[in-house]
Every structure is written in structure tokens, then in C-alpha cells.
Image (tube, rainbow, N blue to C red):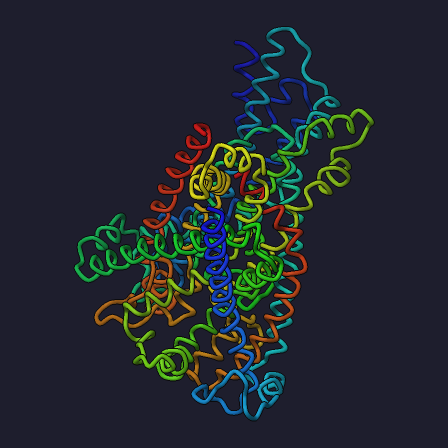
Amino acid sequence: MQHRTIAPLLSIIPGLGQFYNKQWVKGLVFLILGASFVVAFGDLLNMGFWGLFTLGTEVPRDNSIFLLAEGIIALIVSAFGLGIYYWNLKDAYKNGKLRDENFPVTSLKSEYQNLIGQGYPYLISGPSLFLLIFAVIFPILFSFALAFTNYDLYHSPPANLADWVGLETFAEIFTVDIWRSTFFDVLAWTVIWTLVASSLQVSLGVFLAIVVNQKEVRFKKFFRTILVLPWAVPGFVTILIFAGLFNDSFGAINNDILAFFGMDPIPWMTDEKWARVALILMQGWLGFPYIFIVTTGVLQSIPEDLYEAATIDGASIFAKFKNITMPMILIAMAPIIITQFTFNFNNFNIIYLFNGGGPAVAGSTAGGTDILVSWIYKLTMQSSQYSLAAALTILLSIFVIGIALWQFRRTNSFKEGA
Amino acid sequence: MQTTMKTNRFVRLFFTYALLLFMTVLIIYPLLWTVGASFNPGNSLISTSIIPKNPTLEHYKELFAGKESLQYGKWYLNSLKISIFTMLGSMITVSFTAYAFSRFRFKGRKNALMLFLLLQMIPQFAALIALFVLAQILGMMNSHWLLILLYIGGQIPMNTYLMKGYMDSIPMDLDESAKIDGASNTRIFWQIILPLSRPMLAVVAMNGFTGPLGDFVLSSVILRTPDSFTLPIGLYKLVNDVMGASYTTFAAGAILISIPIAITFLLLQKQFVSGLTAGGTKG
């Protein structure tokens, strides 16, 4: 039998294959690594996987949710363990092969240097990776897993156990009437909100940047500072201020401005349609300065010669705008414009801080202005519909990722074509 | 011909200034209104006017009166602490990671970049319940440090992408000549790459600072006691617990946080605008 077969076979117990290849130090390192992994994580893995499969069998001893969390941690730990194990097998195979071909096995010194050289990027991005797993990947896996359980107010610890139910929650979203109608209402408003609010802030920002950038306009610096102010003030503060201004009974918009023009007060907070209008206007106010600044930067980078050449050719202002300014802005800003859309799709703060997604809609857990993310927040924090919230999260993520990937591909091809 | 062009120009400029003036009013009005409200006597806003008849400092005093449910000074410090540490942590982790991804070709690099791209599209609070459970398992409810770690972790994918894109535009020749002179990787990072990435570092710093400052979702899940609140939760509770009743006090609180932030922002604007524009064109 060849060395390249025997060594990895022996390495099924980490380190033995390396001993066989007469790489004593490395073999020892793998052996110790393997043993300590089993000692350190054995209990966690054992308990974790048992918990992951059963979600607990006995109340009040078992807490389904903690078991699920430990199960997912066990999954992540074993993924790392398997990675190292695979490395161990591969190393045994590689050195076995070298021996088959009558080359000397790699020396300890060169291995060490190799490790330092190749390990450098892993070393400096390691802490980030760890944080990422802890703060983002683990929570996302956990939420996704919850979508396949029946975890809600009636199946929550310590009094009750939760259980795996497969795709039942997803099926319920589309079959239970009240959930289905709420879901499609919220989804429809989310899409309208995203499109209208983002388009408003983008077009306002681009338009104002072009207006201020006209050669003849004076006090440019002053106007630019004013126009950036909405971005400079913390967003949550502005939203809460607007919530006061729009207030039906004591807000200045009804009491001062509309009254000044002799108009009747508008029910901004209590009427669904007006609340939506108010939100879109506010987002326009809050969101345009960012686009304004970036567009200004793009405009200043367009070479003056282009316009001069166009003037000599007799192009009108509008022709210059249509054929020079607009294409330049669109190409440079396509990625930023897309992020505005994804941002608004998930723009929880403005919806929730303005009036809590209200006004309330009879018989529905979502209010009149709730978008998907704020509805999910309410389901989690207020009505304890955890598995429903998790299932919605999955649907939302698929939706966002799908659109974003499609958009990125489109803009990439757009860029290459230009 | 000459005159029509002149009238055209006049009309265009007239509408330009009219529009700019209108926008100025639109932007300044809500801000001035808040300033006015903060000096108005009483709690109600019904009689509020921009220039109060009997201006008072009562609301500013109330913020620091040390009431159990209104610990403004504490919230302010909490918010600053969380924002500053998130900013620092974010700058360190992101610049190292971006350096690794920009300058080294290692196994798993492509997959990791793809993962970052996907992760930045899933909002972090999609995993709200999980973070809540995590805080309970770790026994870290109300812990600012847990929140800081979560913020730093959550910002890694997007900021790494931005930073990596920027570092990619720094010519490799610089590294190579330094390497020939015997500089180590870490030294190249500190002395060449990082100083050249300053505009994007400013963007990362800004994201790191303003992200936690504006966050309501994560902090409201993890921070439950009034003395651990940050400003967004504290001020939100102030406005909403007794609707309308403490609006003028909220206005005072809003002023005290907005003015320093806005000034810092306007002063540092130049620093990160070039980074944003570069990030925009690079994608």
C-alpha cells in the first residue's frame, strides 16, 4: 500500500498519520489539538446536538430556546473542528505523496515559515471573523432555525417546550386568512414606501445639487451648509421632532401653517393615508442631503471641456443636461442609489419612531404604516409570535437579497456597456 | 436674441433663488421650532411659538434634575461611550480585515467576500430574538459592552467592503518597493496603506459613531433599565410614555445632543465626503 493512502487513514485519529510520516512535532500538535477539542467541547457537542434534535423532553428541566442556541453553537464549533480535521487529513496525504515520489517530507522550519507567511491574513482578520460569527452569523442561523419551530407565547420556556414543525409556519402565512391579508398589505406598502420615498430623496438630492452647482449662483457655501443640515442632525432626533410637528392636536403643521392658510387640520397621525404621506415627505427631507453631497462631488468632477465642446456644437442647456450631466451622475452613483433603496426597505426608525407604525388596524397585528421590519419587531417584542417573526425574516431576506443581486448584475453590465 | 437670453437667464436665476430660499425655510423651520419649544414655559405645545413670550430654562434644568425616569446626563454619557468604543473597534477591525482582503490571496477569500456581500443585505435585527436570547444566556442584559461588540460585528461586512474597495485603488508598487526595503507586512499596513486610506477611514469612523447613536432596535432589546438607556430610547420614552406631556423637555434634550453633533459633522464633512464619493464610484 502506498504512503499516500496509509498516512491519511492513520490520521483518522489526528496526528497518527504525521507520526507515520515521521513528523513527530507536528503529529504531536495535531494529537493534542484533537484531544483537547474532544475534552473541551465534548460535553457541549453531545448536549448541543441532543438539544438541537429534540429541543428538550422534560419541563421544567429543559429550556427549548437555550437548547436550540447551544445546538447552533455546537454546529459552529464542529464546523471549525471539521476544518482542522480536514487539514490534518490533507497534510497526512500530502506528505505521504511526497514520500511516494521519494521527495523528503517538508521540514519543520519551512512549515513554520509557511504558516507565518500564509497565516498572516488569517491572523489579522481572525478577530473580525470571530466577532462576525458571534454578532451576525450565530443570530441569523438561530432566527432561521426558529422559523421551523412552533416557538410562541404558548410554547415558550420555562412552562412549555417548543418543537420542530417544519414548514408549517410558512404555510400558515399563506393559508390563515388574517395572516395572509396582513402579510400582503404590509408587503405592498413596504414596496410602495421603498420606491416612492427613495425616488423622492434621490431626485430631490440630484436636482438641488444641479441647481446649486449653476455657475451664476452665489453664496454656494451657505446654501450647501444649509442643505446638509438634515443629515448633520441625528436622525432619531429629527423624526421625533417631526412626530411633534405633525401631531394632530398640538402639532405646528396643523395649528400654525395650515391654519395660516385657512385650511382644515389634517389627521396626520390617525389616518392611514395621511400618515403615509407624512412619512414619505419626512424621508425626503431626511434623505436628500446625502445624495446632494455625493452628486455635488460628481458634478465638480465632470470636466468643463465637455460642456464647452457641446456649447460650440450649439447644444441647448437641456441637451447638455440630458447628454452629459445625467449620464455622468447615473453611472457614478448607481451603487449609492441602490443602497438608498435597500436602506429604506429596512428603514425601521422612521416608521417606528414617528407613530409606532400606527394608526392601528382593526383585527391585524400590523398598523397602517408598518413595513415588514417594523411588523417583525412588533411580532417579536409585543405579541411574542417568535416563529412567525422568524419565518417572515427569512422571506424578507430572500426578497432583499434577490433584488439586490439582480440589481448589482444589472448595474455591472450597465457600467461595462457605458 | 440678446434680450431673450438675458430674460431667460433672469427667469432661471429667479426660480433658482426662490427654490433655494424655500428649501432653506423648509429645513430651518423644524429646527428653529424645536429651539423655540425648548424655551417655552409649560409642558404643552399648543401655545408654543418659535419666539417664546416668556422664555425659560426650566426644561434644561429638568433634564439634569436627576429624576428616576429622566437621567439625561447618564443617557448622554452612555450614548457617547457606546458610540466612541464602537467607532474605535470598527476602525481597527475593519482596516485590518480590509488590508487582508485587499493585499493577500488566501484560501477562502472569495467565499468570505461573497459572504460579506450577502450579510450586509440582511438587516442585523432580522436576528432580534437571537440577540435577546444571546444576552440572556450570557447574563449580559443591560450590558453596554455586549451592545458594543454587536455593533462592531454588525458593521464589519459593509465597512470592510468599502475599505477594501478603497485600498484596492492604492497601487501595489508602493507595497512592493517597501517590501524590497525590508518592511514587514504590519509596517506596510501602518505606514503606507492606512495613512493613504484616511478618507475611507473617516467614513468608517462616521458610520461607527452615528450607527449606534441612531440605533433604536438593538438597544431597546438589550437595554431595559432606565440607567442603562441610550439617548434614542430615553428620549423616545420621554415623548411617548405620557404623550405630549414632556414634549418641551424632549425638545431641550434634542437641542443638547443635536448641536454638538451637527457642528462636529459640518467641521469634519470634507474628510469623509471625498471617501464617500470614491466609494460611490468604486462600488
Residue A127 in the image, given as x and y percentages of width and height: 63, 45
- Quarter of the image for residue B76 reads bottom right
Between residues B113 and A268, which one lies in front from this camera angle?
Answer: A268
A262 on left or right of A99? left
| Residue, far top | A102
Where A206 falls versus A114 (above or below)?
below
Give the camera-side residue of A227 and A89: A227
User: What residue do we see at 52% from left, 43% from top?
Assistant: A77
Estimate the x, y position of residue B6 in percent, counting from the top left. 50, 52
Q: Nearer the viewer, residue A141 or A24?
A: A141
Left or right: residue A25 versus residue B212 is: right
Residue that lies at the very extreme toward the right in this rendered image:
B181
Q: Is residue A289 visible?
A: yes
Image position of A200 with respect to A87: above or below: below
State the residue at coordinates (54%, 43%). B280
Q: Which residue corresponds to the image point at 30% horizontal and 51% vertical from the top-left? A: A164
Query: Within the image, what quadrant is residue A264 found in?
Result: bottom left
B158 lies left or right of B121: right
**Residue A318 on image: x %, y %:** 43, 43
Where does residue B33 sit, x and y in percent of width and height?
51, 78
Tell me how many marks there are. 0
Task: Tell me, yes or no, if residue A73 can be seen here.
Answer: no
Using the image, determine if residue A385 lies above or below residue B228.
above
Nearer the observer, A95 or A11: A95
